[in-house]
Amino acid sequence: MTDDSRLPRWNLAPILPRVEEPAFDEVFHRVEQEVTALVALFDRHGIGSQTQEDSSKTDAFEEVVRAYLDVRTRTYLVEAYLECLTAADSRDNAAQASLSELLPTLATLNLLLTRLTSWAGRLEVDALIASSPLARDHAFFLRKSQVRALHLMGPAEEALAADLLLTGSTAWERMHSTLTSQLMVPIEVDGQARQLPMSAIRNMAQNPDRALRHQAYDAEVAAWHQVRVPLAAAMNSIKGEVNLLSRRRGWSSPLEATLFEHAIDRPILEAMMDAAEESFDDFRRYLGAKARRLGLTTLAWHDMYAPVSEASEGWTYPQACHFILDHFRRFSPALDDTARRAFDEGWVDAEPREGKAGGAFCEWMRGAESRILTNFLPTYDGMSILAHELGHAYHNRTRATRTIIQRRTPSTLAETASIFCETLIAQAAYEESDDSQRLAILESFLQTACAVVVDIASRFYFEQRVFERRGLRDLSPDELCEEMRQAQARSYADGLDPNSYHPYMWAVKPHYYSGTASFYNYPYTFGLLFGLGLYANYRERPDRFVREYEDLLSRTGMATAAELAEGFGIDLRAPSFWRSSLDIVRERITRFEALVTLGEGSRGHT
């Protein structure tokens, strides 16, 4: 780890050769050939065919699954590598071309997994598990396959659907990603007309100058307005495709399908959402207190991420790294080693720049190794986001010995380690700070909690309505904007100035633009509240917690959320659990209100 303040770019050289090199072509074409051979193996064993032979399936299962795991793991590495290259620079034409060329191979692998699911789902699963150690290791997959098999079309239809995805939702998703990452926004800053990337414009929401925040918000909305037609076309096409396939596969709705894939059930979702809605008034207390802190009557949308204290600033990248390492080391050797490797071995790309994807993510590469993309700002929030993504890398480490099927963690559980690590750092920073710094730390936590509970609820309401209405016809850009405003009104009410709601959040959020990951909103709420519940468990019994927790993380793709929670005495279907997690949030809102009232470290940003 360097000791200066320059922001690092990640090092992908140890992963694969440069795309322009012949050695990369060799790797690329080798996986294509391996997938072709895998198709032949599936065909030879009749995997996913309309009829199944009556002979013993144990040998066939072990041969086919071992081959699938090997090939899918090697192909995944190429996929992850190209995804990282294109996220770091959407103008990398060579990487974009290779990723596009890889898509048919990925579609073939997805179809092979569908065939394997259909075949395995019709086997005598209990007998297979009893006779095969490999089947026993993948018992969760097999039992889920029995349910999935009931929701598959015929082999020919599934094959056609997989092929059409490439020119359907997958193509629309890539269009959204490319268009938004390259979108340049005109704005006047310090008397100079400039063209800035959308990510830089959205980062201005954190600027202490309210006039600049407002100006950036107006420029952002105007830019989204200019591209609303292609983005609405993408939204309509993707939601129409998902509606059609859900119906043809026998799901009552896309939501029902996602609940199964997210390893929870409707009673869990309803218990969580009921508790979330009960907390909206508490979050409006927070928004009201923040408004008072900023000298405002009511917050506008562009005020939500305004800093409330100078103490939120001044966290350079080296300072953030040292603080994270210090406190990760106190929790677990594995967590400490993960962060240390990330900093020392060039896993992190922290520099904001033109053409780079906005936001942050962590991509597993191989074994215990990951890569982290973030757009670091020298604030407490910047450190918090870095800790969050390192939590994902830690989660990846715990699954290092798991197969690629066992690693398939539902999105409800994918945020468990990241939220936990973010909370760990927040608590450490709070305990070591004065009141002015504590105000900034509480603000960072409450900003995130408000986004993940209140704003996520609005996104959930919006997506429900879009799926319902898209079942009848296309929605115009104006209709999508109106649905978004109504969803935000339901969540925020008068906690924000209703005239300032963001009508184009449907254009901002990439999660709406996936044909394979619908309703990627409520899993964030689940992740926050489940992570807080686990953190409370850790504080009560730290000596026993770490080993059991790392075991839980290693099995997030091998059990339902309810089964994993039971090991910690948590009943996810009981509203009391979700309320108790939200009580942690309420207590911090009360602390935040008290600090605002006392005026500790007061500084207005109007």
Image (tube, grey):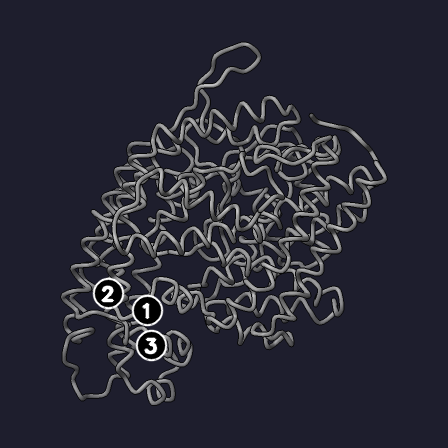
Whole-percent x, y for residue 183 in the image: 38, 28
Please tell me which residue is depicted at 34% across the width and 49% down the height of the picture. Answer: 79
Whole-percent x, y for residue 112 in the image: 24, 65
Q: Residues within 10 Å of mark 3 (few under 14, many from 20)?
A: some
> Which label is found at residue 112?
2
Task: Please name which of the two marks, 3 or 2, marks the residue nearer to the observer.
Answer: 3
The first of marks 2 and 1 along the sequence is 2
The first of marks 3 and 2 along the sequence is 2
Q: CA distance from mark 1 to mark 3?
A: 14 Å
Q: Residue 158: in sight, yes or no? A: yes
Q: Residues within 10 Å of mark 1 (few under 14, many from 20)?
A: few
Task: Please name which of the two marks, 1 or 3, marks the residue nearer to the observer.
Answer: 1
In the foreground, 16 or 483: 483
Report which residue position mark 1 lands on. Answer: 252
Question: Is 52 rendered above or below residue 12?
Answer: below
Task: Please name which of the two marks, 2 or 1, marks the residue nearer to the observer.
Answer: 1
Q: Tag 1's secondary structure?
A: loop
Proximity of marks 2 and 1: CB atoms separated by less than 8 Å: no
Please tell me which residue is depicted at 29% across the width and 47% down the height of the picture. Answer: 236
Q: Residues within 10 Å of mark 2 (few under 14, many from 20)?
A: many
Which image quarter holds the N terminus? top right
Report which residue position mark 3 lands on. Answer: 147
In the foreground, 16 or 576: 576
Q: Tag 2's secondary structure?
A: helix
Q: CA distance from mark 2 to mark 1?
A: 25 Å
Which image quarter holds the C terminus? top right
Please tell me which residue is depicted at 28% across the width and 76% down the height of the picture. Answer: 150
Left or right of residue 518: residue 577: right
In the foreground, 346 or 291: 291
